[in-house]
Image (cartoon, rainbow, N blue to C red):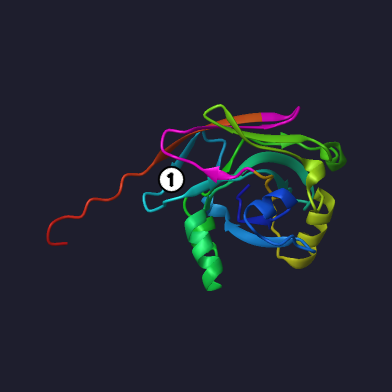
Amino acid sequence: MIIRNVWCVGRNYADHAKELGNTIPQTPMIFLKAGSSCSVNSTEIILPWWTEEVHHEVEIALKFSQYMTIVEGALALDLTERKLQNEAKKAGAPWTLSKSFDGACAVSSFFSIRKLEEFGDHRLRLWVNDELRQDGRTSQMLFGFEKLIEYIKNHFPVCAGDLILTGTPAGVGPLKDGNHVKVELENELRHQWKVSKEKAPTVKDGA
């Protein structure tokens, strides 16, 4: 099933909103990542050569079935070029370049979901080089899974196979060439990636 759209929920953990100096939203804050920016069940993250400060943001991803229900989930990294995002915020410009570059949504394998309420208080963690960076619980989300699904289906042209990224806990930070990233959802899934960075293209004399 093709991932056309990734509906991302911004600032859904209060501590994460505060760590970036953002206000806490009163309704779900939704932005898009291109489905083509996803890499699914890969063990590599390749950062584009032109990026300077790509941050990790671990999230639970929910996938819409052909019947527009949620029967599968995954762990995902909403990779963000933070320097470009901050510049876009100051200019009042879109975040697309900072959020939808090639490989900007690293997704684990999928697991089955029978009842969403079973995931109402699961621990979500991320390590970089075995150092714990992010540690939160789904019970800390400002807007729960059911609320997010209802809001997104009511306001946007959702397609089968689309993902919802449900927000990230505090502790986001930069990834560097050679880093090893591990994520875990309590009692469900663990996934790992190795980070590398593309080499800048060489410029030929006279070009």
Residue 18 in the image, given as x and y percentages of width and height: 68, 54
Q: What type is the residue that disc 1 sits on?
A: Leu
Tell me the residue at 54%/69% (across/down): 90
According to the picture, the residue beneath numbered tag 1 turns out to be 47
Residue 75 in the image, given as x and y percentages of width and height: 65, 39
In-front residue for pair 178/15: 15
Where 128 falls versus 76 (above or below)?
above
Tell me the residue at 48%/57% (across/down): 83
Is residue 59 visible to the viewer in this orientation of the structure? yes
Tell me the residue at 56%/30% (across/down): 192
Q: What element carries label 1?
A: strand
Tell me the residue at 43%/45% (across/down): 47
Describe residue 182's horizontal placement relative to residue 116 as left or right: left
Q: Quadrant of residue 130?
A: top right
Residue 12 in the image, given as x and y percentages of width and height: 73, 53
Describe residue 199's horizontal placement relative to residue 150 as left or right: left
In-front residue for pair 38/104: 104
Which residues are the magenta region?
171-189
Where 10 falls versus 59 (above or below)?
below
Describe residue 3's horizontal placement relative to residue 141 as left or right: left
